[in-house]
Image (cartoon, grey):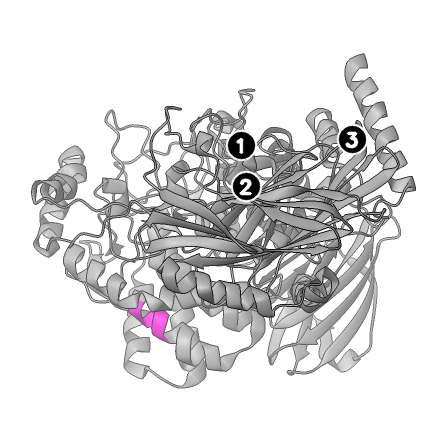
Amino acid sequence: MSSMIIKKCILLVACGAALVAQGAESAGWRGMTMMQPSEQWREGLPSGNGEVGALVYGAVNAERVLFNHNELWYGGRIADVPDMSGDLEVVRELMLAGKYVEANGHYSQKMRGMGFKGTNARYHPAFDMLVTSDTDQMFEDYLRTLDFETGEVVVKWRDGDTRFSRKLFVSIPDDVSVMALTADKAGAVSGSVTLDIHDLKDSIKKDGSYFDAGFSHKTVVDGDFIEFCADGSDGGEFGGVVRVLNHNGVLSADRETIRFEDADEVLLIVGFFANEAAATAVPRLKKQLAALEGDYATLFARHAPLHRDRFNTVSVNINPTGTSDTPNEYLLLDAYQNPASPELVQRLVDYGRYLLISSTRSGGNPANLQGIWNGDYQPPWSGFLGNNENLQMNYWQALPGDLQESMMGFFDYFDSHLDEFRYNAQQLFGCRGIFIPPFMSPESGVMRHTSPHVIHWTDAAGWLASFYYDYYLFTGDEAFLETRAVPFMKEVALFYEDYIVIGEDGKNMFFPSQSPENVPSNMKERVKVQMNSTIAIAVSKQVFHNLIQACVQLGIEEAGVQRWKQLLATMPEYQVNEDGAIREWMHSDFEDNYEHRHQSHIYPLFPGQEVTAESNPEIYEACRVAIEKRLVIGLSSQTGWSLAHMANVYARLGDGERALEALNILSRCCLGQNLFTYHNDWRKMGVTTTHVYGRTSPFQMDANFGIPSAVMEMLCGSTSDMLRILPALPAAWPSGEFNDMLTRTGARTSVRWNMDAKTIELTLKAERDNTFELKFPSDLVDLTTSRPEAVSKSTYGNRYRAVTMVKGDELQLSIRLR
């Protein structure tokens, strides 16, 4: 490490120690600390209630808070999808004749020729709240913090001998944002507040040029209220109202700003409206804000327990003996030179959990590409719902992490668009069932793209269906299985029943099909649509398997079960290429391309559960070779989210060192100062792609969500019949614990481990009846249990034990490893 870096590290540690000494958060705190304000919205500290998001920049004199509302999208166009059902056979005939280029372009050219012009909407900011704080002397002791357990953002500093703070949260029960400005001396709070359109310097295109986003807006003051109203969103008008309450001191106003002088405290309560006429929304919000208590502590006390209860349903601790309040700046500087510290990984796990809780809720939209936080008027990829990887990664952590409220937003959204998904399937392919586009904006499920790899990726619905069945496996909710999971899976199965073709060899054929966004290495032209992609086979197998299991359990759909069993019986076998890797396309015309970010062909291993070391050791090892090729040969083609995906795959392979290596690379190359994840390394260090969108690499939150999933997979993996305890524990985490993690076995699982002593303490609580295998990191020397009759030896060997539990059972085990 250079002398300059060492000096910076020493300075940061010294500053951090001084701040802790004067009352910063102590060890065990779950949050983040920063020593500098943000220069741009991407570095703000996020708060949210699942519908409204806030990003606090943190400047002392001129604070800016960016607000988002997840219903605010603009520039979308929904067009009637032309009837292309007769063209599916045309494309298939071209493919069978080896005319892949012509087959790729057929749908696109014809749809465009018929005048089809659909466009996804873009996610746009709501508005900014601009708060000034009068200053007298040079600021000192600056700090900003985010508490993951409550969603509260705090900015604090000292001006002379007076200490100031701003605190903000977005309320779950009241649907408002609340900010308090305080000082430790009476009459010291002076400044101003206004609402305005979000900073138009962020109105830039992909190439960095400015454009007019087309929003009209106005701000007016009415007594102690400031009203902001704008137009230009697809749904109509939007905006907000802030109520300004001063404790002592005086308020004064001009046309757009309220100024406060010599107050003890100032409270700013902000209400929001989206896609509603301002003439009705503003009076409604003013009435709502006037009825709320003018006291920060009271409003916070109503919100904090709701957020805390969601956050604390599951806990993970891989840093039991270390500090938890080191500033981000120091952790990132350290990670740039060394492996990511347990403290940084722990913070990323807690942060990803916090972000999902804060960006989605039941009855709302799923977390989009940026969660809920965005300051761009033309965000990368419009901030869409990416159903060929990104959205799924957002939710991998939700079920093991017992984030059922967040998961409900996912289910509610897709269930509400089933009619549009049926329309897509019929118009595009003449099939029953549902077709979910890989790229969507949330106001409609109708297909709006003509790119070949978008039209012909037919497996989004099947992949999303896995969450429905998993919900039952993790929670034991049989009512959900019957009323929501089975109906959704049946829609997907109907599509596959019509779409699958039986080949000359008697095996199912999937064509056209697509391995998301990849192209075969032997095709001179970019052939993005192929035949028999591995992921299509794997996803359809999973759908039929899960649907059969569910229907047999419920005693329904006997005829359907027989059809689905027959389709499973005629599935093609997975193939291994000459390098020993699982093939990405199960067709001899298409050669593997390792230099790519997507890892779709590894689906049978992860995120699927079909292939394990026990069930199919040959393909299990072929998946290992395939992911190694991606990491070594294709490292410069990776992204932040693909590294998170890779960490999940290595965890499923039981390779903790490689999983942690992927997280180390991600931490070094794709993290912002506030730990937001980026699509790629903006510093162009040769490790990831070099994508630039506007001013920098695209910010997207999928990797933030994927990191907690990877760490949970490293600590506790599961299928419906096997629970793997510490399957991929790296040497860097010799001790730790996790509590109340949900698993596919239906056993809520808590573990405390000490690898130096070779001991594991395990508690299982049954959410449903089940018999399953326990798999440990190594052979057992000794095992004691609270209920010996529930545990027996396994046919797999001494690393395993068979367990039988009935719903409501609790089982403790103490294990000593060899």
The residue carrying mark 2 is: 646
Label 2–label 1 contact, CB within 8 A: yes
* Residue drawn 44% across the image and 60% down it: 282
Span colored in magenta? 487-491
The numbered mark, 1 or 3, whose residue comes first in the sequence reads 3
Residue plotted at (61% across, 61% down) = 171
Name the residue that disc number 3 marks.
136
Task: Left or right? Give the position of 134 relative to 275.
Answer: right
Residue linked to disc 1: 631
Number of labels in the image equals: 3
Relative height, residue 492 to residue 768 (above, below): above
On the picture, is 680 further left or further right than 77? right
Q: Nearer the viewer, mark 1 or mark 3?
A: 3
Crowdedness near tag 3: few (<14), some (14–19) or many (≥20) residues, C-alpha within 10 Å:
few
Closest to the observer: 544 or 84?
84
Using the image, determine if residue 290 lies above or below residue 769.
Answer: above
Q: Position of residue 660 (x, y in %)?
A: 66, 39
Residue found farthest to the bottom: 555
The span from disc 3 to disc 2 (Cα, nearest Å) is: 51 Å
Residue 434 in sight: yes
